[in-house]
Amino acid sequence: MESDPEQVFRRAMGAFATGVTVVAAADAAGRLSGMTVNSLTSVSLAPRLVLWCLGDRSARYAAFASAERWGVTVLGAESETLARRFAQARAQDMHAEEAETLAGVSVLRQGVAQLACRTHDRIQAGDHLIIVGEVLDVCVRPGAALTFFRGGYGEIAGPAD
């Protein structure tokens, strides 16, 4: 049995299956970056708010922490390569041909859902910054979603998919 409390906590959180998203934001120079995130959470329906968590040690911290507008793409089951690419520790540029615009915000072209967001609040909590966003627009497409569970990728499809 694991005795390191941090590792036990990591394993416990890994037992919570999540969807996989890529958050996109432009830095001060206008260069678009993407980051794989599985901490996306719906906060409120009225107003429409979501949150995600940004680690203080992220190579992309400055760009994402200061972004006033950002996009979220919920990845489809076929997008594991993108999830792995944008999960890498070093900064990951998003190429123009990979992105499209939703309500004036860049999102990945590939995915089962996209949200264009404006930063509503930022809350420091431990070693993460919680970023709360107001959802400006939404696009939903059919298809199975990419999932993450115990360190591995999988998929889940709804009854209509």
Image: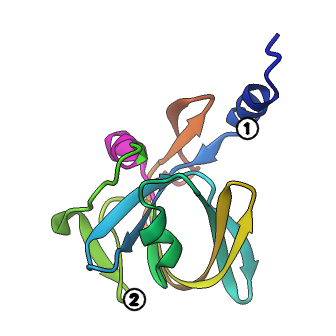
Q: At label 2, which amino acid type do we have?
A: Ala
- Residue 22 percent across, percent down from the top left: 44, 58
Question: Which residue lies under the disc numbered 1?
Answer: 13
Give the CA separation, mark 2 to mark 1.
34 Å
Q: At label 1, which amino acid type do we have?
A: Met
SS of the residue under disc 1: helix
84 in the magenta segment: yes
Establish if 22 lies above or below 103: above
- Residue 35 percent across, percent down from the top left: 43, 56
SS of the residue under disc 2: loop
Tell me, yes or no, if residue 1 can be seen here: yes
Magenta stretch bounds: 74-86
Q: Residues within 10 Å of mark 2 (few under 14, many from 20)?
A: some
Taking the image as shown, residue 28 lies to the left or right of residue 12, namely: left
Question: Which residue lies under the disc numbered 2?
Answer: 103
Going 75% across and 56% down the picture, which residue do you hit? 126
Going 44% across and 60% down the picture, which residue do you hit? 112
Nearest to the observer: residue 8 or residue 148: 8
Q: Nearer the viewer, mark 2 or mark 1?
A: 1
Establish if 116 lies above or below 18: below
- Quarter of the image holding residue 150? top right
